[in-house]
Amino acid sequence: MFEKRNLTYFFTILESIETIWIYTNDIESADEFYKANDQLNFNTTQALLLVIGEESRKIVINLKNEFPDIPWHLIAGLRNRIAHDYRSIDPNISFDVVKNY
């Protein structure tokens, strides 16, 4: 019913989430997140959020409709913001996203 390549997209998303967790698990504030390892954690997390957004856009609409509680449009929107307006990324918002969503 659904294309097998969707599995690849989901696995990539899950791998990205796990890596973000590794980079942010012990961090307790947005300021610490931004400064950790000379911004390595922050920059890597932004790249992985971009990957998550990009992969989520490739998932077929029928499968997305099976999970209406997932805010697919917001995930893609975050990807667009990171990709096209990188300098204005607020570490507080990114920290909130990775810790709470």
Image: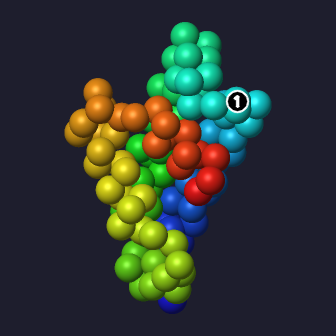
Left or right: 77 in relation to 23: left
Residue 2 visible in this rendered orientation of the protein:
no
Residue at the spot 53% in from the left edge and 78% down from the top edge: 69
The kind of residue on which mark 1 rests is Ile
- Viewer-side residue, 88 vs 77: 88
Q: Which residue is mark 1?
A: 27
Q: Is residue 88 above or below residue 99?
A: above
- Viewer-side residue, 95 vs 18: 95
Extreme bottom residue here?
Answer: 1
Residue at the spot 70% in from the left edge and 32% down from the top edge: 28
Q: Quadrant of the C terminus?
A: bottom right
Image coloring type? rainbow
How crowded pointer 1 is (Cα within 10 Å; few <14, some 14-19, many 20+) is rated as some
Left or right: 41 in relation to 85: right
Q: x, y percentage for residue 76? A: 36, 58
Q: x, y percentage for residue 4? A: 53, 72
Describe the element under mark 1 as helix, strand or loop: loop
Q: x, y percentage for residue 46? A: 46, 35
Extreme left residue here?
Answer: 84
Residue 33 visible in this rendered orientation of the protein:
yes
Q: x, y percentage for residue 72? A: 42, 68
Extreme right residue here?
Answer: 26
Residue at the spot 39% in from the left edge and 62% down from the top edge: 74
Q: Is residue 35 above or below residue 51?
A: above
Residue at the spot 62% in from the left edge and 22% down from the top edge: 32
Left or right: 68 in relation to 79: right
- Viewer-side residue, 49 vs 60: 49
Left or right: 12 in relation to 81: right
